């Protein structure tokens, strides 16, 4: 198999990210968002909100990280961040998925993608911290913009949202402040339980 | 409105790209692909196939260009590349859409996005030429990987595919050769009319 044929096999396999459903809703389509749509939206968000990173970051690396960060869900599924039990097995499931999926690529490229994914998972760099902050921020934004639809369906309270998302502050104090503001507003509108 | 609030308004509006359906199919989900999913997949593809650009490119700029290239479809809809009539009015419709959508952002950022989109549209740089080549390549790949489903539904022939996509060679001779190979193979399998 040529390098290009390996890359094509990987790209065809990647397209399955369309079939992984998240818990939150698309703003306009009135259905749950899939992880491919999310990956696009979060990469665009990072590109536009770079100025709010606590530390200077290479935003292109953040974007690349976000384009690959959910690929492991093709095998491991989306793990709901508010599901403490599923989050225990998440790491092992995703590590195995990364091994299989990135392994479809030519060796040096497989290594590069694995490195990007590892960096995101281990929050090792300012880039990873900001990427994770943006990833959490868009999830809250989608809930906020759909009148708390995902929160309501899963009985999530404001204190749980703040508890689970407090690490956003490590990447961006500004986005963390905005999450506090949006969730407060959501409570006032009756879209989120205090 | 603060800068962040303007950016959030733009991001919420952007999410509507989920509702724009393309003519080609997702490989695994057995339904038409939407433009948000496509935007993710094409950005990932560019990132992985950078080595096949005819000229050296700043691949991060290509990725950013591809993340925003279809946003105008929120207002203007997806224009089928094989529809010659619709393609006449495409430019004016998309220009108006760009003005409205990017205009939601703080001024300097609106300018940056407009510039990226213009560069893509006018094929002004090696980055734009490669971005367009990859954009066309993934459309052919999706057809190839779904046994020509989009081609069959729209009565597209191989000579029409090659005619419409020949500009891929300006960005990447390698991807152009692969398109010729894939379409030849598709004809052999009975998935595409000669």
Image (tube, coloured by chain):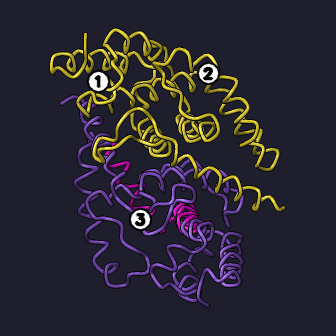
Chain colours: A yellow, B purple
Query: Which label's residue is closer to the chain start, 2 or 1?
Result: 2
Q: Can residue B27 be seen in the rendering of this structure?
A: yes
Q: Residue furthest left?
A: A189
Q: Which residue is mark 1?
A: A152
Report the mark closest to the observer, 2 or 3: 3
Q: Are marks 3 and 1 on the same chain?
A: no
Q: Is residue A116 left or right of residue A103?
A: left
Q: Which residue: 32% across, 24% down?
A: A151
Task: Locate residue A156: give its quadrant.
Answer: top left
Specify start and end residues of the magenta stretch as a single range. Answer: B109-138
Q: Which residue: 52% across, 55% down?
A: B29
Q: Is residue A95 above or below residue A39?
A: above
Q: Residues within 10 Å of mark 1 (few under 14, many from 20)?
A: some
Q: Where the N terminus of chain B falls, by quadrant?
A: top left
The total of numbered circles placed on residues is 3
Residue toward you, A47 or A184: A184
Q: Which residue is mark 2?
A: A125
Q: Where the C terminus of chain B falls, by quadrant?
A: bottom right
Q: Can residue B58 be seen in the rendering of this structure?
A: no
Task: Locate residue A165: give its quadrant.
Answer: top left
Q: Which residue is mark 3?
A: B22
Question: Is A7 colored magenta in this rendering?
Answer: no
């Amino acid at each position: 198999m040529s390098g290009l044929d390996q890359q094509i096999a990987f790209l065809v396999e990647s397209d399955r990210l369309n079939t992984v459903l998240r818990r939150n809703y698309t703003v306009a389509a009135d259905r749950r968002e899939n992880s491919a749509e999310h990956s696009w939206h979060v990469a665009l968000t990072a590109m536009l909100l770079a100025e709010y990173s606590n530390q200077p970051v290479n935003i292109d690396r953040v974007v690349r990280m976000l384009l690959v960060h959910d690929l492991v869900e093709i095998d491991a599924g989306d793990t709901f961040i508010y599901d403490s039990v599923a989050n225990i097995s998440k790491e092992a499931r995703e590590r195995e998925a990364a091994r299989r999926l990135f392994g479809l690529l030519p060796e040096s490229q497989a290594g590069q993608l694995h490195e990007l994914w590892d960096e995101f998972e281990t929050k090792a760099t300012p880039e990873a911290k900001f990427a994770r902050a943006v990833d959490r921020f868009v999830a809250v934004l989608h809930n906020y913009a759909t009148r708390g639809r995902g929160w309501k369906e899963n009985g999530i309270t404001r204190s749980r949202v703040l508890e689970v998302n407090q690490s956003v502050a490590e990447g961006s104090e500004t986005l963390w402040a905005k999450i506090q503001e949006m969730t407060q507003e959501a409570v006032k509108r009756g879209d989120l339980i205090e």
